[in-house]
Image (cartoon, coloured by chain):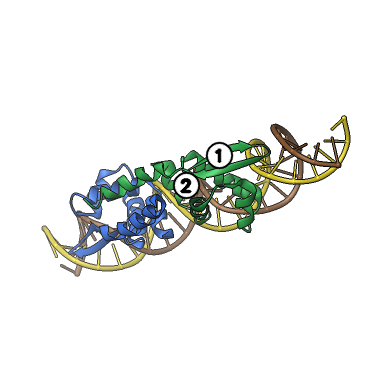
Chain colours: A green, B blue, C yellow, D brown
Amino acid sequence: MNNLFKALNDETRRTILSLLKYKDMNAGEIADYFSMTKPSISHHLDILKRADLIVSKKEGQFINYSINTTIMDDLLNWVMNFKK
Amino acid sequence: MNNLFKALNDETRRTILSLLKYKDMNAGEIADYFSMTKPSISHHLDILKRADLIVSKKEGQFINYSINTTIMDDLLNWVMNFKK
DNA sequence: TAGTTATTTAGACAAATATCTAAATTAAAA
DNA sequence: TTTTAATTTAGATATTTGTCTAAATAACTA
């Protein structure tokens, strides 16, 4: 749960997730969306990956990222616990 | 959303929430539960309050804290957006 | 093979965060 | 009214975090 909450505690990372919700993107496409350097975005992708919120797959010289919504179930369950 | 995710991104604060889930507690009772100074706990309570996750009510020399689960709905909706 | 492109890794640095001790505030009790 | 108790505020400090530039890695292209 720690990694999950940590990953979600950043606006840039939450935006990345909402981008990937609509379609898979490679690292460069994601970086182009932000006014931030590629290394910074790479770092955010790493944190999202560590939280299992996204999955990466190398395709040629590109690295494709896609969202993993199953991990959201953990969060869903956590929240539901407070709604009785 | 920022304040909410920030507040939840800490094990101590999440534990405080799960304590308050069962019964209201005053600041001292909450602090007694942890091996941490009262000022530190007071700071955590402040962050939870700013995120509207808890509510405080002064009763005599005590300050009673209770959970506000309605704010969890925001989080619930946010998560649901990813589960389509 | 040499050069270009996509991405990450490494290292530095400023800002944010969690914690502490000491002091201030507020209310009850003696 | 003086003291005690509950809690917060203030200020200090070490750690974590987000961002950057420069360098490294890996794969495509001419």
Tag 1 and tag 2 share a subunit: yes
Residue at image x 31%, y 41%? B35
Give residue B49's mark.
Answer: none
Residue at image mark 2: A7
Give amino acid for label 2: Ala
Q: Position of residue A50 (x, y in %)?
A: 49, 39
Residue at image mark 1: A56
Residue at image x 44%, y 42%? A3
Of pointers 1 and 2, the one earlier in the residue sequence: 2
* Chain assignment, label 2: A
Give amino acid for label 1: Ser
Q: Secondary structure at mark 2?
A: helix
- Left or right, A82 with respect to C3, comes to left
- Left or right, B28 with respect to A50, comes to left
| Mark 2 surroundings within 10 Å by alpha-carbon count, few (fewer than 14), some (14 through 19), many (20 or more) | many
Give C25 or A79, whichever is nearer the viewer: A79
- Left or right, D24 with respect to A73, comes to right
| Mark 1 surroundings within 10 Å by alpha-carbon count, few (fewer than 14), some (14 through 19), many (20 or more) | some
Q: Position of residue A32 (x, y in %)?
A: 64, 55
- Please tell me in which quadrant of the rendered image residue D29 appears: top right
- Please tell me in which quadrant of the rendered image residue B49 appears: bottom left
Q: Secondary structure at mark 1?
A: strand
Residue at image x 61%, y 36%? A58
- Please tell me in which quadrant of the rendered image residue B5 appears: bottom left
Q: CA distance from mark 1 to mark 2?
A: 16 Å
